[in-house]
Amino acid sequence: MERLRKRLSDCPNCTGISVGRHAELFVPEEERRIWSPWLSVTADDADDGAVLRGRFAPHPSVWTFYLFLAFGLGFALLVGTAWGYAQWATETTPWALLVVPLVMVLGVTLYLASQIGQRLGSEQMTQLRAALEELI
């Protein structure tokens, strides 16, 4: 990690920070898009040196927005289903059950958007991995 810290400021393919045995690598600012990944790297001691463990993830604000939407859809499904059942049980028109197919369509749309984002970011993931290999 010390070698990575020393060379990080000179890396043309990434920016990042490193503290202790952890580093975060980012795509350079001018190439960054909403779908751009981050590479989180942790170094663990091993018998013959160190083992690096890396994880690609979206920007935290993108991940938070995705989870907000997913939980919102789940909550809408719960409320719509419960309300629709209450309408059905009281023998009124269960129009609230229309939420179920709507949430399903929106859920599939959210999933497809995440898959498109992953595909768009795959080249940058390769770039970050190559930058990490160059740094170490």
Image (cartoon, helix red, strand yellow):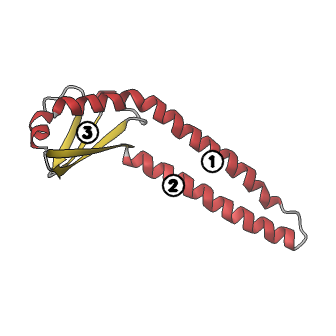
Q: Residue at x 61, y 59 (%)?
A: 74
Instruction: Give x and y (percent) for residue 47.
Output: 14, 50
Quarter of the picture containing the N terminus is top left
Q: Residue at x 52, y 40 (%)?
A: 114
> Marks 3 and 1: CB-CB under 8 Å?
no
Q: Tell me the SS state at disc 1.
A: helix
Q: Residue at x 38, y 43 (%)?
A: 57
Distance in Å between CA atoms under marks 3 and 2: 25 Å
Q: Which mark is residue 10?
A: none
Instruction: Give x and y (percent) for residue 33.
Output: 39, 32
Left or right of 95, for residue 61: left
> Marks 1 and 2: CB-CB under 8 Å?
no
Camera-side residue: 40 or 102? Answer: 40
The residue that disc 3 covers is 25
Foreground disc of the pair 3, 2? 3
Residue 14 seen: no
Residue 41 lies in what quarter of the image?
A: top left
Instruction: Give x and y (percent) for residue 42.
Output: 23, 48
Q: Amino acid at mark 1?
A: Gly
Instruction: Give x and y (percent) for residue 27.
Output: 30, 33
Q: Is residue 109 above or below residue 65?
A: above
The residue that disc 2 covers is 68
Q: Tell me the SS state at disc 2.
A: helix
Camera-side residue: 78 or 47? Answer: 47
Q: Earlier in the sequence, mark 1 or mark 2?
A: 2
Residue 122 lies in what quarter of the image?
A: top left
The residue that disc 1 covers is 107
Q: Tell me the SS state at disc 3.
A: strand
Distance in Å between CA atoms under marks 3 and 1: 31 Å
Q: Amino acid at mark 3?
A: Leu
